[in-house]
Image (cartoon, grey):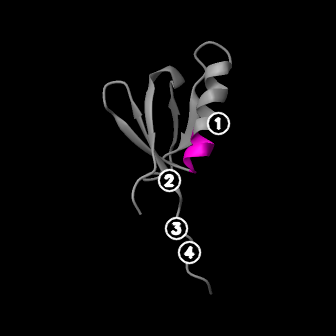
Amino acid sequence: MEPPRPVITTEITVVGGDRYRVEGTAQDAERVILAAARGSIMELAWFDDADTGERIGINPEHVVLLRVPPS
């Protein structure tokens, strides 16, 4: 039996300083954010929260930073 693979995460910082750790690479997060920004008015960028597994929606216009947390 193989050990479980570590989950790749990206930290998203929004206006106001709140940070969200989401599943996926920074490139994946960037694609989702850009797609939401190009979509309809008030379209959210949807992610899986890396800590809780919950689906969270982030307003793409409020994103100020993407960061790959240290492993």
Q: Quick one: label 1, few (<14), some, or many (20+) residues within 10 Å?
A: few
Q: CA distance from mark 4 to mark 1?
A: 26 Å
Q: Which mark is residue 4?
A: 4
* Residue wearing tag 2: 9
Q: CA distance from mark 3 to mark 2?
A: 9 Å
* Residue wearing tag 1: 31
The amino acid type of the residue labelled 1 equals: Arg
* Residue wearing tag 3: 6
Q: Which residues are magenta?
A: 24-29
Residue farthest along the left direction in this orientation: 17
Quarter of the image for residue 16 reads top left
The C terminus: image quadrant: bottom left
Q: Which mark is residue 50?
A: none
37 part of magenta stretch = no
Mark 3 residue element: loop
25 part of magenta stretch = yes
Cβ–Cβ under 8 Å for marks 1 and 2: no
Residue 23 at x, y percent in the picture: 54, 51
The amino acid type of the residue labelled 4 equals: Pro
Mark 4 residue element: loop
Cβ–Cβ under 8 Å for marks 4 and 3: yes
Q: Residue at x 56, y 74 (%)?
A: 4
Q: Residue at x 63, y 25 (%)?
A: 36
